[in-house]
Image: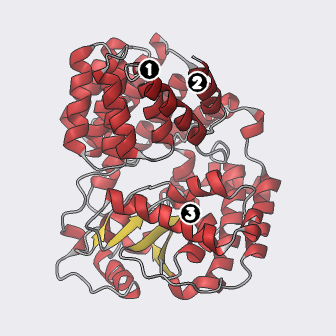
Amino acid sequence: MRLDAAAEKCIDQHRYANAADLLRQAVALNPDHADGWFNLGYALRQLRAYPEALRAYDEAIRRNVVDPEAAHVNRAAILSEYLEQIDEAEQELHTAIALDPGYLPAWLNLGSLMEDAGNADAAATAYHEASRIAPGNGRARARLSAIRVHRGEGAAAINDLEQGLRLGVDSEDDRAELLFALGNALDAEGRYSQAFAVITEANAITAALRPAALQYNRRAQEQLVDDLIAQFPVRPDRVADDVDVGMIFVCGMFRSGSTVIEQLLGRHPLIQIGGELELIPAMVHDHLLPYPSALRNVGAEKLQHLREQYLARVRSNFPLARYVTDKRPDNFIHIGLIKTLFPDAKIIHTRRNMRDNILSAFFLNFAESINYADRIEDLVHYAVQYRRLVAHWQTVFGEDMVVVDYDLMVRDPDAIMAAAFRELGLGVPGHALADAGGSSIIRTPSNWKARSAVNSKSSGRWKNYADALGSGLAKLGEAPE
């Protein structure tokens, strides 16, 4: 009991390594301690020790943990999101549903998994069941709306969402989900002024739900960029980079086309799509705070340890890969760190018309994950700081940074991607990239758009909202190109 209590405190403080050590002691004392195994699985998942986490959850199930369906859902999340074992993940979710047909998280996760796999019918079935179990759940209705819009049923999606808002929702989070979905459905139907008003209301809800300490801080963002530029005035001293897997980091503003561009990169026979690995931000959070000033006191031995830790995760997930993409858009902040750890790594910088980029971010429900997308003015401020930092990285690491312009790419994907492959030092595939089969798994809120044939429909979308965006830009007095 004392070990459990101490581990719970560590988890509350995000000290997952300490929590895992305590829980290992607890289950050693009592191997039938099912809750201890379950909590150990959670701590190990946060530590990204995925195989060990799976074993811990399996032990919890084997030892008759209360609510085993939750353990199956957690196993499914690890299998699908981190280990690319989609069939196994689906089986875990069906097992959870068999144990408790009314278990909402299982249905929601099954819907999301089927969306990732491109199975719209199965995803819709799962979300319909989730809506039946919890009529006020915003996530299920919102994702059903996205599927309907993808199928060309925008008017039906709008009617369903408006009805859901009238009937009531379970929370303000759910209301925001429905409003974001409604705004995007209205946009698809060309009802632009209504769409912008609804999205503005949705963003106001997410801003109100965010604690004051987590609100976007313009001065802090400016200081971070200043500190990064000061920390990396020139290219770091080169160290050996004899890795057996080549890393390609895909980064830029969120909503700059990185998902589509990564999918096209993955059509090269030597490149394995890695998706948003989140390993670099986790490294900073766990080992390099305050960032970036902590880097001044990090020796070669610790840098080597961090590098090997990163590569071990990549090798575990993609054991046969020659090149792996790491598509975490805001890794643009960490290009100095990345090039310190991996001198030979290539950076794909995804770039898009900034007005389109800002609009797309404003229309997406980032919830707690991104705090600058609630207001056009904050998005503009963040974009200005982003461009300032990327301009610096270009002067320092320009020869290793490959710019892929989304707006040019959607007009001539084969030519743009062929040029990118040449800059990466890879041969150009002998087939038409735009028509070749890509990854079967796509994880992005705009999943169905990413699955559509490459086209220029979203390039220049900002013109539908020129008046609304103009007023937002004018408040800062800074209009990005």
Tell me which label, 2 or 3, sits earlier in the chain.
Answer: 2
Task: Give the residue type at disc 2.
Answer: Leu
> Could you tell whether 432 is left or right of 245 in the image?
left
Disc nearest the viewer among 3 and 1 = 1
For disc 3, the marked residue is: 331
**C-alpha span from label 2 to label 1:** 12 Å
Tell me which label, 3 or 1, sits earlier in the chain.
Answer: 1
* Residue 435, x across and y down, in percent: 19, 68
Disc nearest the viewer among 2 and 1 = 2
Find residue 35 and name its label.
1
Is disc 3 placed on a helix, strand or loop? helix
* Residue 374, x across and y down, in percent: 64, 42
Tell me which label, 2 or 1, sits earlier in the chain.
Answer: 2
Tag 1: Cα neighbours inside 10 Å, few (<14), some, or many (≥20)? many
**Rendered image quadrant of residue 429:** bottom left
Tell me: residue 29, above or below residue 367: above
Is disc 1 placed on a helix, strand or loop? helix
Task: Give the residue type at disc 3.
Answer: Asn
Tell me: residue 48, above or below residue 247: above
Q: Which quarter of the rendering shows the N terminus?
A: top right
**C-alpha span from label 3 to label 1:** 36 Å
**Rendered image quadrant of residue 232:** bottom right
For disc 2, the marked residue is: 3
